[in-house]
Image: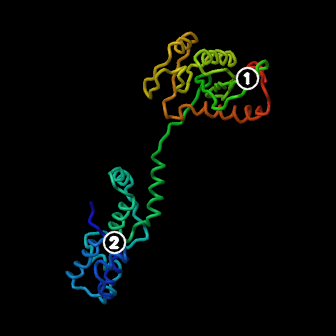
Amino acid sequence: MPNKRLSMRQLREILRLRLQADLSVRQIQRSLRVSVGAVSKVLSKAAELDIDWAAVEALDDVQLANRFYPKADNRQSNQFEMPNWREVHQELSRKGMTKHLLWEEYTQQYPNRSYSYPQYCHHYQVWQRKQRRSMRQTHRAGEKLFVDYAGQTVPVVSGTTGEVRFAQIFVAVMGASNYTFAEATWTQNQADWLGSHLRAFEFLGGVPELVIPDNLKSGVSKACRYDPDVNAAYQQLAAHYGTAIVPARPYKPKDKVKAEVGVQIIERCILARLRHQTFFSLAELNTC
């Protein structure tokens, strides 16, 4: 770890409080909020140099820095020194490490060419954002169909008993064209899940090369980032229609963004408009 080094302002103030105001080490530490060790090192160096306050006042910042920190880069410059953010990022992975400590060490290394702490944090955040790489998804016509259920349900009232059941909304969206199919089913179980796929294919007038579902139990028995298990019935449907099932990776929302946008559109443009309408059958809901 680099040797503890103070800013020029702190260095001058320590010397003033000791050589002019005659304060103790503890009093200086409480006044400037620096460590006792840092204060002691400065005062020891001052004693070694046999320097008094009048001599300190006669020195500019570069001369003073050269006397107390002869091995450091003490050049005056209008150009700030940008930290090595990759090294900063690695250091922050250490337990107990903070940005403020790293900033203090940075200011000690470049006392006249260092950023303020808020600027330091800002530049680090800018660097972090640049490291976040994401691959742009491209979709060929007819290649991918994204499927999911809307989070919102629709109440359906039985005309004979008055019982209210809540219909699930299946949504399928083509990747390239955003052509969207939606229908209501009673459940999200396997029979309804597979049936909705069949009707989606009929509506689209063809079968996509890939179907991208979320990790719903009706389609994926075991969710896994690299090797998910697709249910046998779902796999058989894919084999029959000559398509492939490629489940979205768990906790990777960008894999299914098309489905999520499609669900949002269905909820805002259709379901929101139907909120005051009463439906008495699933068929009535699907034909509205």
Q: Residue at x 71, y 28 (%)?
A: 154
User: Mark 1–mark 2 contact, CB under 8 Å?
Assistant: no
Q: How is the image coloured?
A: rainbow
**Residue farthest to the top?**
240
On-image quarter of the N terminus: bottom left
- 148 horizontally vs 45: left or right: right
- 132 horizontally vs 67: left or right: right
The correct choice, above or below, for 49 with respect to 254 in the image is below
The residue type indicated by label 2 comes to: Val
The residue that label 2 is drawn on is 34
- Which residue occupies the foreground of this view, 3 or 159? 159
Q: Residue at x 50, y 13 (%)?
A: 232
The correct choice, above or below, for 200 with respect to 261 in the image is above
Give the numbered dot on residue 163.
Answer: 1
Q: Of the two numbered discs 1 and 2 on the same chain, state the one appearing first in sequence.
A: 2
- 160 horizontally vs 195: left or right: right
